[in-house]
Amino acid sequence: MTRIACVGITVQDRIYSLSNLPEGGGKYQSNQYLETGGGPAATAAVAIARLGIAVDFIGRVGDDSCGNTLLKELQDWGVNTEFCRQYPNARSSQSAILVDQQGERIIVNYPSPDLDTDAQWLESIDFTRYDIVLADVRWHEGTLKSFTLARAAGVMTLLDADMTPQDITPLVALADHAVFSKPGLKRMTGQDNAEEGLKIATKHTDGKVYVTLGDEGSLWLENVQRCQQPAFSIEVVDTTGAGDVFHGAMAVALAEKMPTAQAIRFASAVAAMKCTQAGGRAGIPNREQTESFLSLYA
């Protein structure tokens, strides 16, 4: 049976819907409020579970009410949290998210300083059980340790290469597949041009590199050749979590050994469908819904 590990952070998202995103200081009134679990690796894990694949979330939360809620929500989605560490007397991470009528958003994240970043405890987990290990860049030490253990076990690795204050080059070097956000790629390579950024990124890894470009689709290099998957045309409600969902679906596709172009198309479809509903998880489709959606574009 296919099994995937998602290593990284889980966050409580508080989402405020507005007609337009703020352009300066002042008071603004939200027309909708939603409170739900978020975080790159955790939301990717939910997407994997929705697609019918067994998945473990490996991360850290506090023992506060927020942490308890985050773990219960993941479990309710079908994600195994057995290997998630809950720290005593610690606060969990949270985010405030503003979303406009076009689905664009501003995210303000508070990464809890109470959660120990040490990842030595991951050595107690048997990584040979997994077909692929997906990790985000928000828990740098956890990704570094899990990828090192995964590679030693001969297990494929997939990096969610998004923005973070730390240099992610060592993580990219350990990734068999590194899927960048456009800002994440620019931060690492200094390139505004995504294709040029990918060319630089390839010099830091023996794996494959990709970049997601929102409504411009996805771009990757295949034998040094430029390849692109256009974005699916949908009515966007909320883009929150779209990248996280893309990574989760990509992990499923890679674990199932789909060819690259098919894997990107599959992940793009799952992420697009998520954007049709508010919040980072509510719109994530199951496998049947995804296949039905893809059949419309055959």
Image (cartoon, helix red, strand yellow):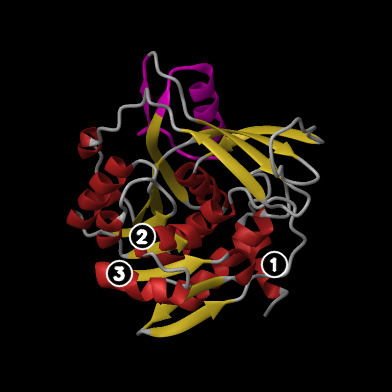
Spatial distance from mark 1 to mark 3, Cα to Cα? 30 Å
Q: Nearer the viewer, mark 1 or mark 2?
A: 2
Q: Decide: is 286 above or below 94.
A: below
Q: Which residues are magenta?
A: 61-88
Per the image, the residue denoted by label 1 is 293
**Foreground residue, 216 or 292?**
216
Q: Position of residue 270 (x, y in %)?
A: 61, 60
Question: How far apart are labels 1 and 2 at the CA level?
Answer: 34 Å
> Along the polypeptide, which appears first: circle 1 or circle 2?
2
Is 101 within the magenta? no
Q: Amino acid at mark 1?
A: Phe
1 and 3 marks in contact (CB < 8 Å): no
Q: Helix, strand, or loop for circle 1?
A: helix
Residue located at (47% from left, 68% from top)? 192
Other residues around mark 3 within 10 Å, as few (<14) / some (14–19) / many (≥20): some
Q: Which mark is residue 259?
A: none
- Which badge, 1 or 3, is on the more N-terminal residue? 3
In front here: 39 or 109?
109
Question: Can you identify the residue that label 2 sits on?
Answer: 188
Q: Can you identify the residue that label 3 sits on?
A: 207
Q: Amino acid at mark 3?
A: Gly
Label 3 secondary element: loop
